[in-house]
Amino acid sequence: MGVVGDTWTWLTTGSHWHGPDGVWHRLGEHLFLTFVSLGIASAVALPVAVLLGHLGKGGAIAVNISNVGRAVPTFAVLVLLLIGPLRTYGDLPTIIALVLFAVPPLMTNAYVGMREVDREVVEAARGMGMTGWQLVGRVELPLAFPLIMTGVRLAAVQVVATTTIAAPAGGGGLGRIITAGFRLTDTPQVVAGAVLVAGLALLVEAVFMIVERAGDPMRRRAGRRAAAARRRPPADQAPPAPAVTGG
């Protein structure tokens, strides 16, 4: 049948989807590691980047420091955690490595998004008497939202693809299917695991793109204005002005 046919057979075999080593269980573990790591990284990186972007100070240094993580392979970080002070296997070292991996795109995009907000708009809002927090919440964040969400989407897809490193560390996830296939010299299982990871990454990217479009404050405001304009009667249908009679 060939690798493609054997891989399809593996994916369509019901016994491979159920049980503690089945696809559904491994998928749940993969999603758990992905979103816990992404949530922690977002909680660390986004507030710092938004604050520094608002102040316009120290952001370049913070971004450069966070980008150091891109130069170090995530698997190398995981190995150092396993043989270093932690000396433990399972989900914890994997989550730490994934958080360090996710911080750079989150930090960079959020900071750049805040700094690329039109300064004239910011100064006009400040001239209207807005406080710093009002300026961030009502002006800068809505305008920076698309770029911030792009960073979140990139980080999510990268983390989904990289969570497979949990398997060598004794953690769960779809990587366990791939490593089991290598151990059994079962090429269709290895390919099936890779296909599942790739499909999940594409699905996560699609979901975040939908969230980005639906959650964009500026897009929603434009939609409300367009809806209000459609409800407004045309000028030629407006009621006639009352006649003015002479005294």
Image (cartoon, grey):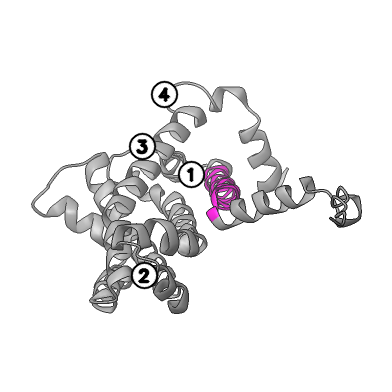
Residue at the far front in the pictured view: 247
Residue 126 disc label: 2
Mark 1 closeness class: few <14, some 14–19, many ≥20 residues within 10 Å: few
Asked whether the residues under the numbered discs 2 and 3 touch, taking CB atoms below 8 Å apart as contact, a structural biologist would say: no
For the residues bearing labels 3 and 1, Cβ distance under 8 angstroms: no
The earlier-in-sequence mark between 3 and 4 is 4
Q: Residue at x 59, y 45 (%)?
A: 203
Q: Which mark is residue 20?
A: 4
Can residue 151 be seen here? The reply is no
The picture places residue 149, in percent across and down from the top left corner, at 48, 57
In the picture, the quarter occupied by the C terminus is bottom right
Pointer 3 or 1: first along the chain? 3
Using the numbered discs, state the Cα–Cα distance from disc 1 to disc 2 in whole angstroms.
Answer: 65 Å
Which sits in the foreground, 215 or 202? 215
Answer yes or no: do the residues labelled 3 and 4 have beta carbons within 8 Å? no
Which amino acid type is marked by label 3? Gly
For label 2, the crowd category at 10 Å Cα-Cα, with few meaning under 14, some 14 to 19 and many 20 or more, is: some
